[in-house]
Image (cartoon, coloured by chain):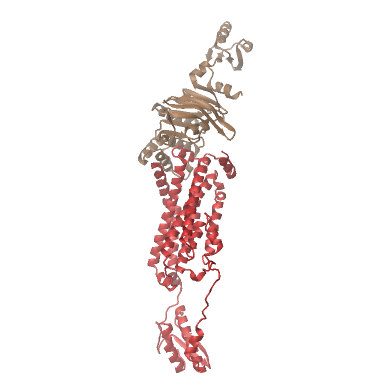
Amino acid sequence: MGLSINNLTMVFNEHTAVDDISLHVEEGEMYGFLGGNGAGKTTTFRMILNLLKPTKGTITWNDTHINYDVTDMIGYLPEDRGLHPKLTVQEQVTYLGRLKGMSQKDALEALKYWLDRFDVSENLNKKIGSLSKGNQQKIQLIASIIHNPKLIILDEPFSGLDPVNVELLKEAVLELNKNGATIIFSSHRMEHVEELCESICILNKGKQVLSGKISDIKRSYKEKRMTITGEHDLAFLENAPGVLEYTKKNDTVTLKIAEESYAKDIYETISSIGYFKKISVEDPTLNEIFIEKVGRK
Amino acid sequence: MNKFFMILGSAYKQKVKSKAFIFTTLITVAIIFLGFNFNVIIDMFNKSEEIETITVEAEPELKEGFEMLLPNHSETIKVTDDSTNILTIERDKNTLTSLINTEVELSSDDKNAIQNTLDQLHQTLVMQENNINPEAIAELNTKTDLTEKTADEDAPKSGFDDINPANMVIMYITLMLMFFIIIGYAGQVANDIAQEKSSRVIEMIVSSVSPTTHLVAKVSAIILSALTQILVLLIGGYIAFKTSNINEAVQKFDLEFSDNTVSIIIICIIYMLLGLLLYLSLAAMLGSFVSRMEDLQQSIMPLTFLSIGGFYIAMFSIATPGTILVKLSSYFPFFTPYVMPLRLIDPDTSLTEQFIGIIIMIISIVLIIWLTTYIYKRSILLTEGGMIKSIKKIFKK
């Protein structure tokens, strides 16, 4: 059950935009797509939605192929934002809601609920063209989730929003997920993905470089980060065995070590020097993993 | 199917409720009413009045002659002895000079009546003077009969004389209506499609409903709103015709419907519908090439040229519907809706040719719709680059 993607490939002319991606998203899961610009995220989403026909591979939702018979249970927020500037919020959103099979009354009720939720209820009868960019983005998110979809695909939902609005949107996404929706979203912002998702997939130039549960990925990563805060001089650690990187900021030294076992040796060495306020060993952040996988090639 | 009717209904309502639709319809209806009542309007600004009596000051012979001849030219004016309108006629041998003094400005009808009476009076005087009998005058006025005979039986022989004027009026109205409706609504179709594409809302729409359903529903809604407008204009025109007194004026032109007038009207309506379908589908295709609204005018240029071409060929051939140009262009799909109905008023056109025209139109419409949906599906997600780049990309894949 859930969303299954098998050997998905998309070739435009001679350019391979998506190269043999396979993954599985469990029903009710929150799944993150990570990748730089041109990594193939939007193309993958469009194939899931049946807007583009894959060159190769299959996509199924609960074992059935996705076509226009089942699109009513999918919500989609495209990366290219835009609504009809001359329509009012009510006209546009209820129209899109009715396209998803809602009645005018239900769509209007749901719209009012979400406008209230996002603190923009005064915009109900305003023309979309007259709203600020951030508010337009909220309206578009509402339009994509108004029909209470089972599968929600959000392409860069947080880009261009201020921190307050990012929090509002995040809460809404979490609520939808809690109510049973499966959510797939893409982002450049690692902290959002790390905070919201259980599983991720990292794409680079159309290729799937990494996928799975975040906790498993991190655990499988042997390199660790060690932070030591104290007043003693630790410059000698730069050349210690297992240390890959050494950075010092004020009285905090951050080390990147090849394996957790080296941390034990370092701990024993420095604890003989004297008192340290903080010594910690952590898994690498998603940001570090991403840069490691995508940035260095 | 439900979504199709939902899009159709909501697009239709939006069109018909739009200010542009309401205003253009009202203004056109107002123009029709003004047109049918132009004689009333002209009279409003024309201060001249009809006179009822006239006093003639002349030698008794002339006075008597005038009084006798006047009823031939005017039923309203009576000759009396004490009228304030005084006509003075002076005679110098066979030449008459006259002067009329009236209280109000003389209407053109009255002036013509008096002028004609004087002319006839003058004619009679000359005849009497020269001893010409009236029969001789009548014989002089008969025209010589000229009969045409052509060796080539098939040569186009229909000229202005063969064409029923009532059918020609219907043709003018059809051509005008078709041209303006096609140009106006083709612009709207292209504009709507391009707007959805350039505002990017299309990606959300096609994630709910297939592009083909969306396109066909949208174009159908616009065709329906065009038909609504035509219907309103026709009803408005009918009411204006019935309520104005122009039908008296029209009767003076001897506009009589011929046997084929009804079939001409029916075929005109068929071609108008087919023409709308063809041109609006083409407009949808052209609109879908556009990714920025600035390129819209440029993109619908080919459609405008085709439409103007067909319209002008038809307009300039309205008196000569049998020429080779008309025959050839009536089989070119984009000219067919304009030119083929015109050939109806030529008695030499067979019904078979009309059916061939309709079949050509139907095949072209099916092809254009197929091509439009093919292009639309591939172009809606292309939002970068100009038109030429989009066209290249669409056909490369």
- Colour red, chain: B
User: Does residue B27 appear in this view?
Assistant: no
**Residue B76: image location, x then y, percent:** 39, 82
Q: Residue at x 52, y 81 (%)?
A: B144
Question: Camera-side residue: A16 or B185?
Answer: A16
Question: Camera-side residue: B297 or B357?
Answer: B357
**Residue B77: image location, x then y, percent:** 41, 83
User: Does residue B98 appear in this view?
Assistant: yes
**Residue B31: image location, x then y, percent:** 45, 63
Question: Camera-side residue: A238 or B178?
Answer: B178
**Does A131 sit above or below residue A41?**
below
Q: Residue at x 52, y 76 (%)?
A: B147
**Does A12 sit above or below residue A203?**
below
Q: Residue at x 58, y 45 (%)?
A: B387
Please give left or right for residue A226 compared with residue B135 in the image.
right
For the C terminus of chain B, give its image quadrant. top right
